[in-house]
Amino acid sequence: MDKTIEINNLSKEYKVLNRKEGFKGAILNLFSKDYKYIKAINNVSMEIFSGEILGILGRNGAGKSTLIKMMTGVLKPSAGALSINGNTPFKNRKQHALNIGIVFGQRSQLWWSLPCIESFKIIKEIYSINDDVYEENMNFFNELIPLNELMNKPVRLMSLGQRVLCDILASFLHNPKIVFLDEPTIGLDIDVKDKIHKLILSLNSKKKTTVILTTHDMGDVDAICKRIVIIDNGEKIYDDKIYKLKKYFGPNKTLLAHINSNKIRDDSVVITNIKKLIDKHIQLIDYLSVECNNRWIKIVVDENQISVLKVLNLIQKEFDIDKIEIKEISTESVIKKIYEGKCL
Amino acid sequence: MKNYFKKVKYYIHIYRMILIQDLKTKMSFRADFLISSFSGIMLNAASFISIWIMFQNFSSIMNWNYYEMLFLYGFSLLALTPQLVFFDNSWVLCDKVFKGDFITYCFRPINIFFYYTFEKININAIGQFFIGVTLITYSWIKLGLDVNTIIVFKLIISLLTASLFMIAIVIFISSMSFWIINAKGLMDFFSKFKDYTRYPFTIFNNFFKFVFSFIIPIGFVAYYPSLFFIHTEELSWISFFGVFYGIILLYFSYKVWVKGALQYSGTGS
């Protein structure tokens, strides 16, 4: 695969005034030259391949936006090299803009009072898109979502979901090599989120566009990204396939079982009983955590040492179980632990 | 050179598209269109009445009689129209920069000033154009000025160059939003100066004359170019200088605007 984006030791520093508090401080601030430098992005290197869907994750203020702004050419890096399709983004902004598309979940780039189709026509002229390419894309878009009801509606009358769908389509109209999606599903319902996931996946597979997604919604990441990069405090702390992330945590599974008996009143008795039970039959006890709440037993099992079914088999001999549930560890909880520094 | 023409053609083509679309949507909100045109006319009528009342009590202001004042007023209305109609988006730049919406203008393969400024056209302000034409024609007849092709041509040229000043001022002041967080106050402050364009500059003392000629050059909006037609005894090199000064100012404020826009990096999110 060929590389679309190459980032080498990229850093971005912001000059910030050391502000003093209070009214006296505010006056002193006017004349102060006491600056400090804040590293928004610190020595980040990565490669992004063409046709890939990459998720960039990070807490608020981690530096995601700064990274994206540098890739789109709005911000100039303080140090390091950034090359997109062989170009340096901030040096030739107009040329770079022809190769990228951008969608902001919270800000529309379509003309607010115009019907959507008219915005598309203006975009066609701005990017000098050929009639053939335009027709072909519109037909393809129409296969993905029925456009008829959307296209003649002014953008300001659209629901948020419709607007984001149109914004995404508009960003693909000029066949860009890279599309940046900045929190595209923010504030949307599950149904529309699902539509957007499908839309992005089919646009990506048909047009081989590189898609770079920033989001806080793990649902987006699980649905469309194969690889994720996690940024924290301006540094890259994870960069790999998404399924490998789960392996970091060992093959833990959570077993939930509900006891169908009113006789049991005390949850702590249940816990000690289960622990005794497992201790008796299997000697390795330290890899299990057992909790009990309102007759719901929760056991986290390390599948490398014992299978969930074996544990289930054990406890259902002792207790009358009527409901069970087996949960994989979610990406969200893994990432949360990464932020807390418990992993890597 | 060929490339250059191609570029100009490209921009004119896009502008035409935006203009047509904007007109279409404006027409679809008929009530809105009529009411805002009406309010624009009433606003001008109010300030016209204040001149009229003034002249009920005084016969002239610094040797300028009623019709000459009307001419000046009409001239200023006409010279301010292009700014109102075509550069209306400049007034809201500070909000867009402050809230971070301006970032969406940074990603198109097109001149960012063009893309932002001409996104909207305030066609409602065209009412002001007709009031201006009426006032100038009326005072022209009353003052008994000559009518020939040369003088009409001269009027059009001086109106066009005069209109550059308000455009340049608004572009320059709005571009300050890129550096200072809340430029709204500054915009309001400068929009007030529009009213001073309607008076003959002989009413100001030397200090204000200097300020309004070179620092905040509103004198070139109506007073100095009007001297080509009325009160020609007050005509000096400044009026001729204005023709070039407008172009220089416009170019300068455009450059400042673009410099600001290119270093803009949005809000924190």
Image (cartoon, rainbow, N blue to C red):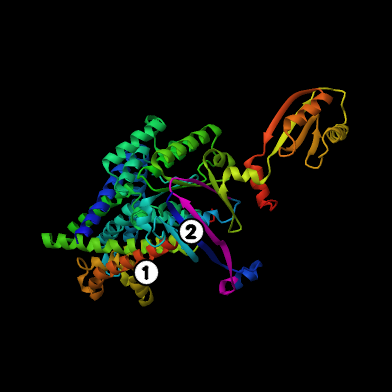
Q: Nearer the viewer, mark 1 or mark 2?
A: 2
Residue A171 x/y as whole percent: 40, 44
* SS for dot 2: strand
The kind of residue on which mark 2 rests is: Ile
Viewer-proximal residue among B115 and A67? A67
Query: Residue A35: within the magenta?
Result: yes
| Residue identified by numbered label 1 | B216
Q: Residue at x 30, y 51 (%)?
A: B128
Q: Tell me how far mark 1 sits from mark 2, CA to CA.
A: 47 Å
Whether residue B215 is situated above or below residue A299 in the rendered picture = below
Query: Residue at horizontal 30%, vertical 55%?
Result: B81
Q: Secondary structure at mark 1?
A: loop
Can residue B29 be spotted in the picture? no
How far from the left and from the top, in percent, is residue A240?
56, 49
Please, is residue A32 above or below residue A256 in the view?
below
Report which quarter residue B8 is drawn in.
Answer: bottom left
Q: Is residue B138 magenta?
A: no
* Residue A240 or residue A322, whichever sits in front: A240
Q: Amino acid at mark 1?
A: Ile
Tell me if A89 is positioned left or right of B228 in this view. Answer: right
Circle 2 residue: A7
Q: Which residues are magenta?
A: A29-57
